[in-house]
Amino acid sequence: MPGPKKLDPSSSPRALLGAELRHRREAAGLSQDALGAPLFVSGSFIGQLEAGTRRMQPDQAEKLDEVLGAGGFFVRNCAALKESKYPDHFAEAAEAERLATTIREYAPLLVPGLLQTEAYARAVFRAYQPTATEDVIDDLVVARLERAQLLTDPTTPLLWVVLDEAVLRRQIGGPGVMAKALRHVAGLVQQHRIIVQMLPFSAGAHTALTGSLKLMHFPDAPALAYLQGLGTGQLQDDPAALRHYELTYDLVVASALSPAASLAMIESAAEGYDHEAQQL
């Protein structure tokens, strides 16, 4: 069995902490479970800290310094992890997203952030924050587009998205913006960069009616599920919960259209918006 992926400590503060944590834990002769016990976390959580897929919290850093005799190393460096371009409820998920080899997502209302165009993202953020200055909106849009750079790699991560039909029907930013947004998604499908399926209204009730779902898998750490609500977000790694979310996603996929039929539906909606924009 291959050993854990070696992190480049210079790549990010999280990678630095993860590499140092693994080094000090192994030097102390502790298993991940043994180190997790005094922190009241699972061994798999320690593994996620070491792999860089979870963010170390200040109280955890303090306890790790104490248990591993790190002389304040983790406390001093943990502060750097608080710096993020993203809202607090999404920052940890965005950082984990960068390390994922597979991302599977059900999007009930909006084109997922990784697939949004600039104009679509701007319309979304303006709706979220109607009184924000243009500078604030600009910063949010830039951060979202930077996330999409994940897809410049030709193969990793594998991104498989199920879009609810509501994503096509709700006009964000007007017909012109919608046409370009949907053609962008269709283009990525045609380039074989992503897999997209549509969940039509005709599918009726399904297992993910209550909200969005994102599943992230990593080469050397347990999977994570990200659930998002109004101004809130939660990462989950409990094995039982993950099994439930995996089944939920599988059942959504089973109710969705085939990739070919889904692409045709997206292109048809884009054509409709193009026609509507030309009439304005």
Image (tube, rainbow, N blue to C red):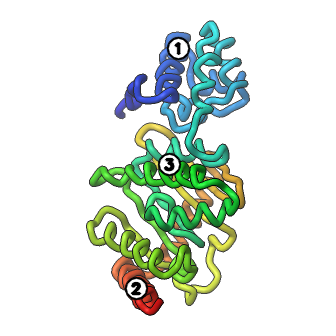
Q: Residues within 10 Å of mark 3 (few under 14, many from 20)?
A: some
Task: From the viewer's perspective, tell me whether residue 230 is left or right of residue 97.
Answer: right
Q: Position of residue 80 (x, y in %)?
A: 58, 26
Could you say which disc has been placed on residue 126 in the image? none
Tag 2: amino acid: Asp
Give me the C-alpha separation between circle 3 and circle 1: 34 Å
Among numbered discs 3 and 1, the one appearing first in the sequence = 1
Q: Quadrant of residue 277?
A: bottom left
Could you say which disc has been placed on residue 24 in the image? 1
Tag 3: amino acid: Ala
C-beta proximity under 8 Å, tags 2 and 3: no
Q: Position of residue 60 (x, y in %)?
A: 68, 25
Identify residue for label 2. 274
Could you say which disc has been placed on residue 143 in the image? 3
Task: From the viewer's perspective, tell me whether residue 84 is left or right of residue 264.
Answer: right
Of badges 1 and 2, the one in the foreground is: 2
- Viewer-closest of 247 and 7: 7
Query: In terms of secondary structure, where does tag 1 sit?
Result: helix
C-beta proximity under 8 Å, tags 1 and 2: no
Q: Position of residue 198 (x, y in %)?
A: 47, 78
Of badges 3 and 1, the one in the foreground is: 3
Give me the C-alpha separation between circle 2 and circle 3: 28 Å
Q: Residue at x 47, y 77 (%)?
A: 178
Among numbered discs 1 and 2, the one appearing first in the sequence = 1
Task: From the viewer's perspective, tell me whether residue 278 is left or right of residue 112.
Answer: left
Query: In terms of secondary structure, where does tag 3 sit?
Result: helix
